[in-house]
Image (cartoon, rainbow, N blue to C red):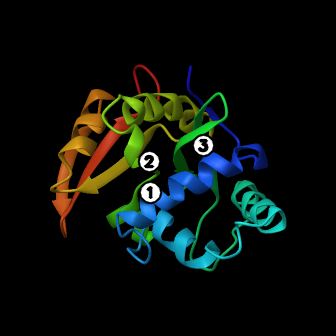
Amino acid sequence: MPALVTPDVRFKESFLAAMAEFAAEGRAGDGSGIGRDLETWTGRWETEEGFAAYVAQRVAEREQVVEPGWVLNTNLWWVADDEYIGRMSIRHQLNDWLREVGGHIGYDVRRSRRGHGHATAMLAAALPIAHGLGIERALVTCDDDNVGSRIVIERNGGVLEDERGGKLRYWVPTSPGS
């Protein structure tokens, strides 16, 4: 059964296969976390040392801001057995950009595993973690033409606040009654 786990080097092979799927979609340089990682780490994370450095940076973001303008961020991977399926990013607070565009929570599922309910389950699993970080209602955004993400957010109780610059902004309770 899939679960959210702390990033770990043991998932290297399936992680890199997933990144190849994202690259084939044209995600490198698209402004997303996946796009930034593809630009920054391709050519480095293929080695044991490079992948270990990548994983260490993702884990460290929980306790230290690694780039100017960023916030503390809990990165988790959605895995089943030894297969990397996707990733979840829980930002501990909102800065101006996150308030408008990125939100508290972002997620990606590799192309070969989409359409199987993984994103809905990932978001559901992340909400109690966000609550534990003191987030009562999480802002979750998606492109206005991303019907799949809209369904994921709404299935997790998301209430549409508005649309800004092509992004739909939803507030999702992180615990029952919040």
The relative height of residue 150 versus residue 22 in the rendered view (above or below) is: above
Label 3 SS: strand
Q: CA distance from mark 1 to mark 3?
A: 16 Å
Residue 89 or residue 13, whichever sits in front: 13
Report the mark closest to the observer, 1 or 3: 1
Residue sitting at x 40%, y 43%: 112
User: Is residue 64 found left or right of 24 in the rendered image?
Assistant: right
Q: Which residue is mark 1?
A: 21
Q: Which percent across, then down, holds residue 40?
A: 60, 77
Which quarter of the image is occupied by the N terminus? top right
Residue type of the residue flagged with mark 3: Trp
- Tell me, yes or no, if residue 87 can be seen here: yes
- Tell me, yes or no, if residue 134 can be seen here: no
Q: Are marks 2 and 1 in contact (CB under 8 Å)?
A: yes
Q: Which percent across, then down, holds residue 133?
A: 62, 41
**How crowded is the residue under tag 1: few (<14 C-alpha within 10 Å), some, or many (20+)?**
some
Q: Which residue is mark 2?
A: 110
Q: Which residue is mark 3?
A: 77
Q: CA distance from mark 2 to mark 1?
A: 7 Å
Report the mark closest to the observer, 3 or 2: 2
